[in-house]
Image (tube, rainbow, N blue to C red):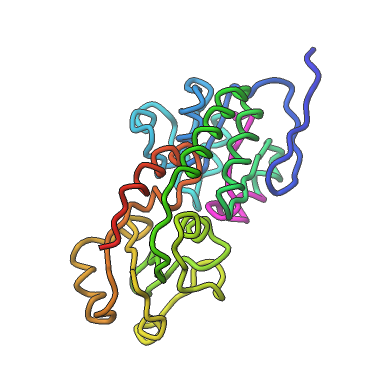
Amino acid sequence: MQQSQTFFDQMRNGIQLSGPPQRIISLVPSQTELLFDLGLDSEVVGITKYCIHPPEWKLRKAIVGGTKNFQLDIIESLKPDLIIGNREENTRDLILELYRHKYAVWMSEIYTLEDALQMIDKIGLLVNRADQANKLVAQIKHGFESLMKCPPLKVLYLIWRKPWMAAGRDTFINSMLEKIGLENCLPALSRYPELSNDELKALDPECVFLSSEPYPFKEKHIAELRLILPNARIQLVDGEMFSWYGSRLTKAVEYLKQLTLS
């Protein structure tokens, strides 16, 4: 019998596995894509309805629900030997319920690019794809080192409408803005604060990014914001490139290189 090995997640919790996991459920879209890019396929048996990359997995894998309302009965039916989640993406009470059912749950906790690279390394070890993970990490590091810095503009990154919500400090989005040389308008506010029209005006950002997710901002919202912030440069951005912290970071580098603050 193979001896079990202890793996620690980014919340410092340990899980024991007696071998490479063969029935994995991923509760986080960016980490689902990472598993695919590490070369896994049949080992992944369940994903969420928001796991859109790779698209073919939505047709072939069991859907366990959303990231914050996954269904425990479906998870139980899949008999997973590993569940991969994230502290921010997943609901605390449901994760605690998975712990109570004695599932092996590995949780990421990511605020910076460095956290994301550590997560990729740790999941690579966890699923017996350490070499592939090391190559991904090296590629991402090299890509970000080659990035030219943007002009040091004050940026407001909006993720929601009615109410307006923005990315503050202690977010991966904030880390990405800093990596490309931009200054977040909300350095004193944590996580995702709600903002009124008057508060938007008081921030007086030089540039506003309207994310494609979780709220699907469109061109019509640029006109709406211009009534509130007539002096700001306002543009739509691909939210995956600022908030997905798995292997999509390889694509984010090229996207950020082409980002124009117009």
Q: Which residues are magenta?
A: 79-96
**Which residue: 44% across, 63% down?**
182
Image position, residue 19 (x, y; %): 70, 20
- In terms of image quadrants, where is residue 228? bottom left
Q: Is residue 69 left or right of residue 232?
A: right
Image position, residue 55 (x, y; %): 34, 33
Image position, residue 45 (x, y; %): 50, 28
Question: Does the segment drawn in magenta span residue 87?
Answer: yes
Q: Is residue 226 left or right of residue 114?
A: left
Dividing the image into 4 quarters, which one contains the C terminus? bottom left
Image position, residue 190 (x, y; %): 56, 70
Dividing the image into 4 quarters, which one contains the N terminus? top right
**Which residue: 44% across, 32% down?**
62
**Which residue: 63% across, 22% down?**
128
Question: Does the segment drawn in magenta span residue 97?
Answer: no
Counting the numbered discs, the total is 0
- In terms of image quadrants, where is residue 169? bottom right
Q: 64 and 8: which one is in front?
A: 8
Q: Is residue 234 left or right of residue 77?
A: left
**Which residue: 78% across, 15% down?**
2
- In terms of image quadrants, where is residue 230? bottom left
Q: 9 and 51: which one is in front?
A: 9
* Residue that extends furthest to the top in the rendered view of this protein: 1
Is 98 above or below relative to 197?
above
